[in-house]
Every structure is written in structure tokens, then in C-alpha cells.
Image (tube, grey):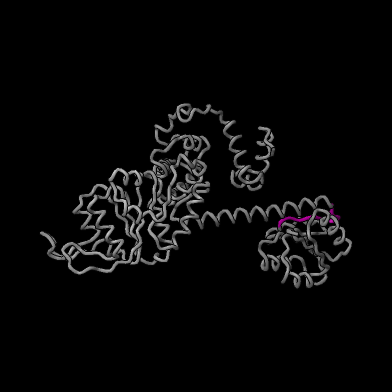
Amino acid sequence: MDAQIAIVDDEITVCRRLQHALVKEGYGVETFQAAGPFLERMTVAHFQVIFLDLRLSDMDGMRLLPEIKRRWEQAEVVIITGYGSIDSAVKAIQKGAYHYITKPLKLEDVRILAKRALEKIHLRQEVDNLKRVLAEDRSSFNGLVGTSGEMQEIFSLMKKVAVVDCNVLIRGETGTGKELVARAIHNLSPRSPYPFVSFNCGGFAEELITNELFGHEKGAFTGAVSTKIGLLETSHRGTVFLDEIGEMPPSMQVKLLRVIQEKKILRVGGTRPIDLDIRIVAATNKDLKQEVQDREFREDLYYRLDVVNIKLPRLAERKDDIPLLISHFIKKYSTALRKEISRITPEAVEILLGYNYPGNVRELENIVERAVALAEGELVRVEDLPPDLQKLDFFSLDGEELLSLEKVEKNHLVKVLNKTGWNRNLTSEILDLPRTTLWRKMKKYNISKK
């Protein structure tokens, strides 16, 4: 059985009554008439909930309580007292007890306390798991955030390809996070102790690209007063990220292909080839296959780069991730700007959910940074968003009907309940609502599990 409960009371009749009532609820129950046998049993058994009498023959329950919490902090202890002493109950709660109950015991109260204590444990575990997963994902992927199916598939592919030493081509629109993906692959790979070098291939003359990537020898040309080591050479044993690879001039494509094939470079003006061990991660917002067909990009270089292909979706294609991204950026810029902002109003979220983001995640990040900078108090509000977003006409965005705030709230409640498997405690935690408030809203909107 999943839930294990211990009853520690010197009255055998109390133990039997409670055991009978709780076993009927489906719990595994063990009883003890003294502290000694119970502590010995705790060395091999973990009890989620413990009903503990304050008066035991071999140890005072108040002394036993901190010993229980020391051995297993996650356990919830319900104090049993025959004296109805509020002072004793308060002291016990201060020492970590979950609740207290007075003799004569009402079995219905016992059942309710057991159920609520277990719900508290499960909720704490789920919240801890969510925090750990999010923390692991964010640290592992350098700020990449997403729980949508599209992003989870990309995270999985990144983990697989990171440990395989092959070239990678990342495709996606501007602002989708291509460099973040490249850095994450490097950080997850055996090359992580060595340099990660980034270079944008667009907007530079061929001579400048050659000089930056390959370097030059002293006296190679007028003004070359000393030897310059290029970016490729400085990234030896590490990773080179070539952004906008589709903009690389044709003659540079030939030079890059030679580097990949021979694993050597030659500085401008140099005569001695230099051994080079690098991994190339390239990125583009172009359709390189079409570029190859149009003879704008070398076919042999394309296949050298496109060993593993990662396609990043537009933010508009994974809108389920927007609330999580908003929260992530609020936390990031609240820290950076030394402000105490932790939340955003539902109205502001609704506007951000309705926008199409031609600039993708980068645009959302800029919007949130601006909002955090302008926000007063602890909340980001509609008036903190850019003026053009404040005036959004929802009819023109996607043809959906303009919803009332009540309809929006109802839809959001149902969405979170579905995500949590209709776990009201976890839903209350995520929505930052008291459980009673959640219940009233569900009743108000006639929300029930189908």
C-alpha cells in the first residue's frame, strides 16, 4: 500500500479502534504501545502519517516528536491528547506537528486528518518535483523554457545529440533561440570544458570573415603588424557556432568545407597547416535545401553540416509555453533590475497570449523586460505593456470571439485543472488561491470533471 500510517498510543483499545477505521480506508497501519518499539521500527519503515499520544510509558510524546522529525522530516504527526490542553497542542505544532486531536477520539475526525495530512505530503512532493524539474531544465538548457510537446521533443533530441560528436544544423526564425540551443548542446557535451565560440556570418565582407575565422600571420598584408589567432583556432577541442550560415559567401563556403574535411586550418599568409579539432553547430533562418537547389549554397557543405537537424518552432506555434516564459523572464529581470516583482495580472497575460510574436521568444523577453522596468509595486499590469499591445483588437488576431473576464477565468481554471489531473490542492498552489476560493469559483462556473 502507498500510504503507511503509525499509531503510537499506550491504550491498546485506542490503537485497535484507529487501526480498524484507517485500514477500511485502504491505508497500511501499524500500532505501537510505547516509543521504544516504534523508534526501532522507524529504522526500516517510513510512515507518512503518525498519530502520537503525548503520554507514553517510556517517553513523553513531546520529546519523541522532534526525534521523529529528525529521522524523517517529511512525516506528518498528529498529536493525540487526553487532556485537551491547548498549550500542549500549540507547543507540539511549533515543534513540527501537523495537527492535534483530543480524546475521546471521533473516528471521522481521524479519517479526515489522515486524508488531509497525506494530501499535504503529496502536494509538497509534487511541488518539489515541479521545481526540481524546472530548475534542472533551465540550468541544463541555458534558459530554454518550455513544457509544450514541441519543446520537450527538442530537449530530448538535444540531450541525445550532445554526447554524439557530430555537426548540427539548427533551423528557425529570428528570435526562436538558436544560439541558446547551440550553447546547451555544447554545455551538455564532452567538449564543455573547452571554448564555445560564436560568429555571425551575415553582413560581413569576405576578407573580414576570413580574417576573423582563420586569423593571419605577421606581415600577411599591410597593417598585419602581429600574428592574429582566428576564432576557429581559439575554439580548438570546443564548439564553433556559425549563425546565419546561409549568408556565408560562396568562396568562404569552400574554405569551411576544406576545414571540415581536413581538420586543419591555414592562417592568412601562413604556410604551415594547423591541426584543428572542433565541432560545428550552424544555424539559419533560410531553407538551405532550397538554397542548394537554387545554387546559392554548396550541396557538399550542406550535407556536412546537416548531420542532425533541429527545427525550432515559432512562439506562436507553442503558445502553451507563454505563461511559463513570462514567469521566467519576470524572475530574470526582477533580479537583474533589483525589483520585487513576482506576478502579472490575468488581463496582461491574456493580452500576451493573444499576440502573434513576429520576433518570437526574443520579442516576448523584450516586452517583459520593459514591463518589469516600468512596473510599480509587485505586479506587472496592462499599463506596463507597450502601447500597441494595450490597444490590441482581439477580433483581428485570430478571429476568436472577444471573451468576458469571467469566461477567461473559467477557461483558465479548467485548463489548469486538466493539466494537474483535477488535483485541487496542486491547482490551488499553482493559481495561488486558497482551496476554499477555488471551490467557490468551480461552483460559480459549474466546473466539474467530465
Residue at x 39%, y 32% (from the top left corner): 387
Quadrant housing residue 366: top left
Magenta-colored span: 98-106
From this viewpoint, which residue is outermost toward the left? 222
Res 34 quadrant in image: bottom right
Q: Which residue is outermost to the right?
A: 13
| Front-lying residue, 140 or 47 | 140
The quarter of the picture where the N terminus appears is: bottom right
Report the number of discs. Answer: 0
Q: Quadrant of residue 365?
A: top left
Residue 155 at x, y = what percent?
48, 54
In the picture, measured across the screen, residue 141 lies left or right of residue 269, that is right
Whether residue 88 is visible: no
Q: Position of residue 256 (x, y in %)?
A: 27, 57
Where, quadrant-wise, is the C terminus in this rendering? top right
Taking depth in this image into account, of 354 and 240 the one nearest to the observer is 240
Q: Is 354 rendered above or below residue 115?
A: above
**Residue 190: image location, x then y, percent:** 42, 66
Inspect this view and state whether residue 249 appears.
Answer: yes
Nearer the observer, 269 or 329: 269
* Image point (86%, 55%), residue name: 104
Query: Residue 259, percent across and down?
Result: 28, 61
Please say whether residue 9 is one of the residues in the magenta stretch.
no
Q: Residue at x 81, y 56 (%)?
A: 22
